[in-house]
Image (tube, rainbow, N blue to C red):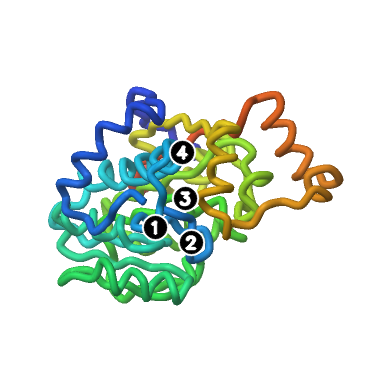
Amino acid sequence: MTQKHNISREQQVTSSSTAASTEDLNNLQVKVSIPSTWGLGERLVPDKMASDPASRKIVEINFHHYKIAGRYVREKRVLDIACGAGYGSQILHLAGASKVVGVDVCPDTIQYAQQHYSASGIDFVCSDAEQFEYPEPFDVVVSFETLEHLRYPEKFLERIRRSLAPKGEFLLSVPLGETRHFDPYHLHKYTQGEIFALLEKAGFLINLYRCDDLFLSRSDLENWEKLYPEAPQPSVYELLFTNRGRRVLSDLIFRGGFKFQQLLVSTSVADNSGNS
């Protein structure tokens, strides 16, 4: 039986409206400073990022998502799956979670997290998000910017549902639209409706969602080439003679940069006891 979405849509905001949250996040005493760079294999490493506007947009949206997740975690057991450098796990811990387990597939990333964000009540584990298992259920699972990277997102969502306690909650974020041309780590593109359908199929009830607009202008990206010279850049051949490169050029010439949305969704485990 098809479930009906119980959606209460939060007010749509743009990236500029998240700026006010930066001071609040600093007050959490998270060990970060803006400077960030993409490091450790496309993980956001806040204490290595530059203070340019584009970098701040990325940091603010990511931190704002964790700040929202912090409303759900007080005195809860929390899984931060694909935790990256670990700053988000610490935000959840400082928001009152009784226990946080941060999981990432990259050993260097987990080592960085242990060195910078370890605390009593936070455990960092090196494991594949699509295979991770834990002996105890979690009250809340958080997974931001993960689904688009996975080979088998449907199996991942089923695993998340099984890891949740009864009445458990799952929060995830994912970029909408085509992003694979400017982010080669992305394996999938999604619409909002496709994400809702995946979640429903996996046994989740959608409670709240919001979309944040993000635009990286051509000047932002040109500045990034100077700020992050170690970041891989497409060759002239790739730009001119591959579909991905031509899409990059099209966006830069006709749209002035890369524009996309970040979807944030709050879900709970669906109660199927009344279905027939």
Dot 3 corresponds to which residue?
A: 145
**Residue 102 in the image, given as x and y percentages of width and height:** 33, 66
Whole-number angstrom distance, CA of label 1 to CA of label 2: 8 Å
**Residue 4 in the image, given as x and y percentages of width and height:** 43, 32
- Secondary structure beneath disc 3? loop
Whole-number angstrom distance, CA of label 3 to CA of label 1: 19 Å
Looking at the image, residue 39 lies above or below residue 34:
below
**Residue 232 in the image, given as x and y percentages of width and height:** 64, 57
Residue drawn at the location 20% of the way across and 65% of the way down: 99
149 or 259: which is nearer to us? 259
151 or 165: which is nearer to us? 151
Residue drawn at the location 43% of the way across and 68% of the way down: 104
Residue drawn at the location 38% of the way across and 44% of the way down: 51
- Secondary structure beneath disc 4? helix
Circles 4 and 1 in contact, beta carbons < 8 Å: no
| Amino acid marked by disc 3 | Glu
Circles 2 and 3 in contact, beta carbons < 8 Å: no
| Amino acid marked by disc 1 | Lys
Whole-number angstrom distance, CA of label 4 to CA of label 1: 14 Å
The numbered dot on residue 48 is 1
Extreme residue toward the front, this view = 226
Total number of numbered discs in the rendering = 4
